[in-house]
Image (spheres, rainbow, N blue to C red):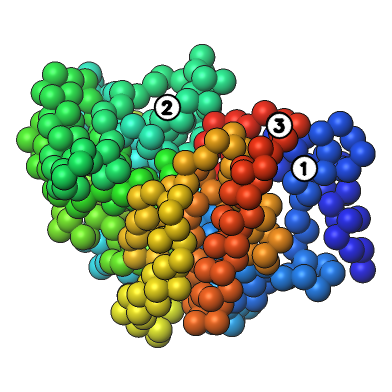
Amino acid sequence: MPLNDEWRRRSLAAVWHPCTQMKLHAPAGEAGGAAQPLRPIARAEGVWLHDFEGQRLLDGISSWWVNLFGHNHPALRAALVEQLGQLHHVMLAGFTHAPVVELSERLAALTGLGHAFYASDGASATEIALKMSAHHWRNAGRLAKCRFVGVAGGYHGETVGALAVTDIALFREAYAPLLRLAATVPSPDARQAAPGESAEAVAERAAAALEAWLAEHHAETAAFIVEPLVQCAAGMAMHHPLYLQRARALCSRYEVHLVADEIAVGFGRTGSMFAHQQAGIRPDFICLSKGLTGGTLPLSVVLCTDEVYAAFYDDEVARGFLHSHSYTGNALACRAALATLDLFDATDALNTNQQTAARLSAQFQPLTQHPRVRHARQQGLIFAWDVPSSLPDFARRYARHALAQGVLLRPIGHTVYAMPPYVINQEEGEHLARGAFAALQATLAEEEQGAATPAVPAGPAVMDGV
Ligand SMILES: *Cc1c(COP(=O)(O)O)cnc(C)c1O
């Protein structure tokens, strides 16, 4: 069987990797080479990723936040094998099948939003929610309501429509001519608190800014899109649920849809099944993906209210929702999602996660108490620490040291974070916490030595991590 080096070489020749300056992976010997070798993975089990040479890494970020119950979970595998023997896929226009019906019913029961529209990735879910919102207002005769507003630092995906509501300067700059940019209002990020100011006060301040914006622009605004409780891609920016309560009230008052993008924070990650539930609100739309299939297959869904659905229910085709993906409601992916939901019940995941989070919190104490760490914070099974550093490529260096410790962690800018699979046990938590701490020590030691200028200049935060 080919070993790591061969897969690395073949991948670099044939595969264009996401969110990556490919030159950073250039082989040793080439200009700027060997900075960050690509990691071939042969198989995975639980929290561990195994390469082709017997080395293993603890997946401290759940493979970009998609994995919930560990890799290669036997229950998910069994459900998929069973589904493989029945139905892989059938077009969802004019046809239906058991997994898509059952999944839609269960998501409706969990959220109170009774209509499910499927796609295959998070960005497509964002696109669907935006189109559905604007089309709803059009059907209601409110043609001017076709603009959107999001939160500063918000991330909702990178297709052209989703990018228009994603507030990341680098991406917006390169693709600006293609976009119909949405407006942004200030983030309720609790780190902005002045000395002595509470997270609630920051939330109130941000809500006041949203109110001022809506008061002026509601007539042209279809929807407000927000990542409830944690703006993950912004660097695990956390806010008080009060912000969501205020936003809900304002959106209702100004007749603007509230879109909860729970693509990263849904499915128990923040402590509740869905993050917005901690604010006791009901959004008009919920976007889900990432953890939906437990990290097995691509699937996303937009859930909407009866009110939204009713605006499309008509004799005229053109008043229906005009959107389609070939793989909409794929049976295998829906079955994986159902099996994932079963695991929440079977493992009493929300309660178990509380204990896991408390245990990890204790294990992370050395990192949390490190004199260079600022804003140590936690929400459910998301842990984050800011490390102001003079190293422009802090994230990259840290990630490299973490890998050397047998841990997959990729800081976002100067924010180190961990978002492990829910099944992480005591011993694995220890490995993660020890590796995270050792990587910090090693990175700061390089800073102290006045680390050499990186061969490739460091990019803005998101390119440097996520
Ligand atoms: C990852 C993410 C998306 C985009 O999902 P993709 O499947 O990567 O397109 C959208 N919104 C949030 C909050 C995300 O974290």
How far apart are the alpha carbons under marks 2 and 3?
34 Å
Residue drawn 42% across and 27% down? 164
Say which element carries label 3: loop
Sequence-first tag of 3 and 1: 1
Q: How many marks?
A: 3
Which image quadrant for residue 439?
Answer: bottom right
Sequence-first tag of 2 and 1: 1
The label shown at residue 164 is 2
Residue 16 position within the rendered picture, expressed as x and y whole percent measured from the top left: 74, 40
Q: Given this view, does label 3 or label 1 mark the residue nearer the observer?
A: 3
Please tell me how crowded label 2 is: few (under 14), some (14-19), or many (20+) other residues with Cα within 10 Å. many
Say which element carries label 1: loop
Name the kind of residue labelled 1 in the image: Ala
Please tell me how crowded label 3 is: few (under 14), some (14-19), or many (20+) other residues with Cα within 10 Å. few
Residue lying furthest left? 253
Residue carrying label 1: 35
Q: Are marks 2 and 3 in contact (CB under 8 Å)?
A: no
Name the kind of residue labelled 2 in the image: Ala
* Residue 69 shows in the view: no
Residue 54 position within the rendered picture, expressed as x and y whole percent measured from the top left: 81, 73
* Residue 391 in the image: above or below residue 400: above
Residue lying furthest front? 449
Residue carrying label 3: 453
Sequence-first tag of 2 and 3: 2
Name the kind of residue labelled 3 in the image: Thr
Q: Given this view, does label 2 or label 1 mark the residue nearer the observer?
A: 1
Residue drawn 41% across and 61% down? 368
Q: Relative to residue 411, is residue 319 drawn left or right?
A: left
Image quadrant occupied by the N terminus: bottom right
The label shown at residue 415 is none
Say which element carries label 2: loop
